[in-house]
Image (tube, rainbow, N blue to C red):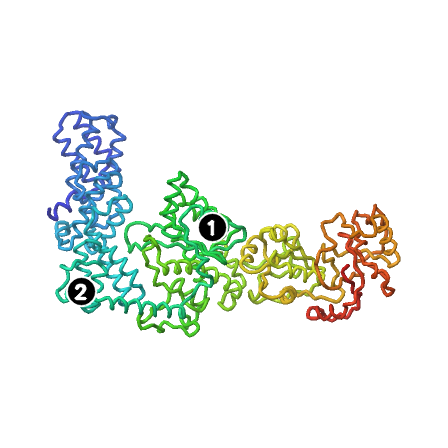
Amino acid sequence: MNQDSYSSDQPTGQDPLVLLKTLQLLWTKQELGKLKEEIRRGFARLEDPLAGLLAMLESSSDWKGKGHSLGYCITTELQLWIKAHPAVPQAAILSIKLKLQPDQDVEKMCTPLLLQDKTNLVEEYVAEYPELQRKLLQTLDTWCEPSFDIRDITRPYQGLSKYKPEKFNRRMLSKLVFRLLERFNVDSALCPNVINQRHLRTLNYLFYKRFVEKTMTEENWADHIQSTVGENRWLQGHLVQSLLRHCDARGAARWAQHCRVPPEMLPQAVAEELQKLHIQDRVEEVTKADNYEASKKKDYYQLPIPRENIHFLQTWEETRQCWEKVLQPGQVVGVDMEWKPSFGMVGKPRVALLQLALKDEVFLLDLPRLLEQAEAEGEKEKLPHFIQMLYSDAAITKLGYGMSGDLGSLAATCSALKDTEKQMQGVVDLLAVDKQLQWGKDSRKVDGLSPEHSHEERGVRQPEKGLSLLVQHVLGKPLDKTEQLSNWEKRPLREEQILYAASDAYCLLEIYERLCKDPESFSLGSDLTDSLVGKQSKKPRAKKQLNKQEAPSPSGQECQGPRMGPSHPPAPISPQEFSVVCDNMLQGLGRYLRCLGVDVRLLDNEDDHRKAAEIARQEGRVILTSGLPYHTLRSQVGEGRCFSVNCSEKAKEQALQVLKHFNVQVSLGDIFSRCQVCNCNKYLKVSRESMKQLVESSRQASGENSAGCLGSQSCSATEPVCDTAQPGCTPHSERAEGMEQCGAAPVLAGDTVLQVTAIPPGVLDRAELTDFYCCTCCGKVFWEGSHFGHIVSQFQDVLVASRDTQGIYELS
C-alpha cells in the first residue's frame, strides 16, 4: 500500500442531495455501471460521508428495501468503498453506524486508527462483537512479542494523514490490551506476550522492594515471586538473571531453592552452591529474623490491646456477634481492607480481609470465606446488608484512610455493595485530614526518629509515607509496612499479617482521638470536627451568632472541647443560668455540678449516647461527654451544644474544666441550691415546730416503725446521691402554705408527698435548728448540718469572692 492510496479522494464538500439526484437519474436509466462509479466517486467528495449517507437514505423512498433498490445499491457500494479506504476515520464511523464490522478485516480497519491515536474509535468499533474483540486482542498481543519489529506495522502507513508514530509503541499497546481485557471481560490467557511483559515488570519491582529498598519481608517476597513466575520458563530465566545481579552465587542458590527454580535452568556455579546449602543457613536466617522482630517493637507503632482481643472471623455466627458490637449508636470504628497485590493487572482487586477496630477489640473478617458461606446458605445478601448498615448509619463514626479506593475494591468484591459510597454517612477519611495538616521542614523526624535511622538487616530505611507517616507525626512512631504486600488471600494468615492488619485499623482510632483532643499541636483550627465528620466544606464558613433558640450555651460561645482553638472569654454567668445533660460515663461530674447549683440531667447507664443529643435539642442544654462519643454527638447537635472533658480525671477537675470554659462563677449561695435527688431548685421552708407536728402525725398514722413515705415522684429517699450536707437555698424557698395531710404523710399542693418520716428523732430535738427545707418536686427534707467547714473547703476552688454564710443542711 503506497502513500497515494491514502492521499487521494479528498473531500470537496459536495451536496449529498445533489449527488442523490444524480444517482436517482442513473438508477432510472438502469445505467448500473455508471451508477456504481458515481457512488464511489461521490462519497469520496463528501465532506462528511456519514451525514451524507443518512441524508440520501432519508430522502430516498426505497432506502429500507433489499435487493433491487437504489438504497440497497448505495449501501452495498458504500461497503466496498469502506474496504478500499480503511485509513479514513469516516470509514470506521460508517461501519459502526451501519454495523458492517463482521464483514470487514479488523486488523486492516483498526491499524490506521491506532496510528492516528484514535484508540477510543477502535474500542467502539469492536464493542458489540466478542469475536472481533478476541481477534483484535490477539493481533495487538502479537505486536508485543519481544522479537517482533513494530516498524513492520508502521512502515506502510507513513503517508497517512495525522500520522502519530511516536504514540504507537509497546507501552501504549500494552495499556490498550489491559483496558480492553477489563472492559470486555476477556480471558487474559489470550494475550501471553502482554501478560509476560507485565509479570516481568512485577518481577523487577519485587527485586527493587526486597534488595534495594529492603522494605519487604522474606516470606512476602518469596510468595509473590512464586506467584508471579510460576512454571513459566521465560520468567524463570529472568528470575535467575535477576538473582545473579542482586546476590552472589550462594544467595542466588538459596533464593532459587526457595522459589523452586528448576536446577537445569541454573548456571553451573549456582547449581553447585544449591547442593552445598545446609540446615545451618536456615538457622541463621531464623535468628536474624527474630532479632529484627525484637527491634521492630522499639521503633514502630505497637497495638495497645492484647493479642486475645484480635479476632479472625470465618463463620457467620462469629460475624453476627461482631456486628452486634459494631452497630451501636455513638460507636467509632476504624475500618481498613487488605487484598492480594495485583501489581497493575486487570481490574480492581478483590478484598480478602475487612478490618473493624473498636476501642478494646479488632475484628478481622475473612470476606471471601464469609461471602461463600452466605451464598451456600442461600443468604448471599446478609453480609453486604450489614456492611451497608455500617456505612449508612450517621450515628456511627467510620474512620478510614483513602476510603474511596477501599470502597471501589469492596464493590468489585460484591456487586451488592456498588452504591455504598453514595449512601455513606458519618465517615472520616483521615487522608483528607492528612492533607490539611501543616508539617514543618523536620516533619519526618519525630521523637528522635528520622529516615536515616536504620537496622543492619533492613538497610537504609526509606522515608515514611501515607498512613505510616501520619501515624509517625501524630503518635510518635510509624507503622511497620513490611507486611503490606502480603498475599492476603493465602490461608492461614501468618501471625505477622494478623498483627499488621489489626494495627492498620486500630491506629485510626488513636490518630482521630489525638487530633480531636489537641488540634492546636498539629496546626489545626478550632473547626477541626466540622472538617472531619461528613462532607468537607469547600469554603470556610463564618461563625454564626446563635440566638437563644439555637444555642443552649449560656455564654454564647462554641463548646468544642478542651484546647480546641483560641476564643474570646465568654461573659460570666451564674450556675442557675447554665443547664447541661451528662453522658452516662460522667455521672460523677453531673452530681458534682448539681452540688454547685447547675441544672443537670443525667443519662441512665442503659441509655445510649444519642439520647443526650435528643435532650440537648429539646431542652436547649449543653452536652457534656468524653472521648470518642464526643465527635459523634457533636455532629448531631448545633454549634455550641457539646463539650468534651477528660474522663480520666476526677469529678472535681472535670467540673473546674467545664466552669472555666463557660466562665461560670459560683458563689456560696449556689452550693446545694438544687435538690441532689431530682435537680429541683424550689424548696418549701418549714419551721422546726411545724415539722415536729408533721412527723408525729405521720408516725401515728402509719406506725412508729415506718421507714418513711416515698412521694409520687420517681426519687428515692434513701438514694445515696451525696455524702455531704445539703443546704436549703433561701432565695428559692417558700413558707409552708397549702399543705394537706393525706393518710400517713403530708402532701403539698402539687401532690408531692413530703418524706418526713425519714427524719431521725434526734434531729428534731436540736434546739439550734429553726427551719427545715423540703424539695417541692420529690419531697426530700433537708436541714442544717454540722459540716459547714468541710463543705467550704471541698468547694473552695470553685467559689468566687462571695462570703455568704448561708445555712448548710444535712441529708436526711
Picture coordinates of residue 766 (x, y %)?
Answer: 85, 64
Q: How many marks?
A: 2
Q: Which element type, helix, strand or loop, lies under badge 1?
A: helix
Q: Residue furthest bottom?
A: 448
Closer-to-camera residue (612/96): 612
Picture coordinates of residue 651 (x, y %)?
Answer: 64, 64
Residue 274: image tag? 2
Residue 322: image tag? 1
Picture coordinates of residue 251 (x, y %)?
Answer: 21, 67
Q: Amino acid at mark 2?
A: Leu
Residue 746 visible from this viewpoint: no
For marks 1 and 2 on the same chain, the one whose residue lies earlier in the sequence: 2
Query: Mark 2 packing: few (<14 Cα in 10 Å), some, or many (20+)?
Result: many
Closer-to-camera residue (400/792): 792
As drawn, is 706 to the left or to the right of 384?
right
Quadrant position of residue 720: bottom right
Q: Residue at position x 21%, y 26% from top? A: 66
Q: Amino acid at mark 1?
A: Cys
Q: Which element type, helix, strand or loop, lies under badge 2?
A: helix
